[in-house]
Image (spheres, rainbow, N blue to C red):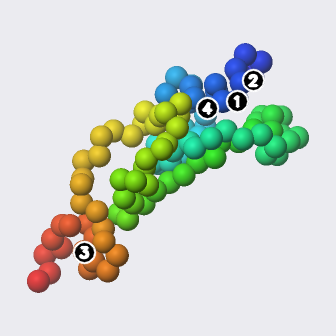
Amino acid sequence: MHANRLTAEQYVMRVCRGELRDPTLTFQLKGGFHVLAVVSGYLQYDPDSRGYAAVIEWLNEDVARPEDYAGRNPRFPNVYLGPKTSTTRHTPGDSNPSGTSNGVH
């Protein structure tokens, strides 16, 4: 469909910006994944992908540090993620990683 007028990277960039909808990638982006790159040589005989794939990453915000987010490719922004509303980060070993009270003392 779009393969005749867009490269694989252009297609993924437009999906990341919300200009196109891809049933799989859009779902993953809405779930917090980020595109790291577009690669060739994946399922070479698949007519839909034409042998391309998006390499995606999901970082657990409870343990990720700011440096884990550094260096992301700006060509693949995730428009489906709004500003982070919580600055609470889980430290391994915490008994209550959410930072909220569960009413039990």
Numbered tag placed on residue 3 in the rendering: 2
> How far separated are the C-alphas under marks 1 and 4?
6 Å
Q: Residue furthest bottom?
A: 105
Circles 1, 4 touching at the beta carbon (< 8 Å): yes
Please, what secondary structure does the residue beneath circle 1 have? helix
Numbered tag placed on residue 96 in the rendering: 3
Task: Pick whichever of labels 3 and 4 is earlier in the sequence.
Answer: 4
Task: Pick whichever of labels 2 and 1 is earlier in the sequence.
Answer: 2
Q: Is residue 12 above or below residue 42?
A: above
Task: Pick whichever of labels 2 and 3 is earlier in the sequence.
Answer: 2
Circles 2, 4 touching at the beta carbon (< 8 Å): no
Where residue 90 appears, x then y in whole percent?
Answer: 30, 68
Where residue 46 appears, x then y in whole percent?
Answer: 83, 40
Residue type highlighted by circle 2? Ala
Which quadrant of the view contains residue 39? Answer: top right
Residue type highlighted by circle 1? Ala
> How far separated are the C-alphas under marks 3 and 4?
38 Å
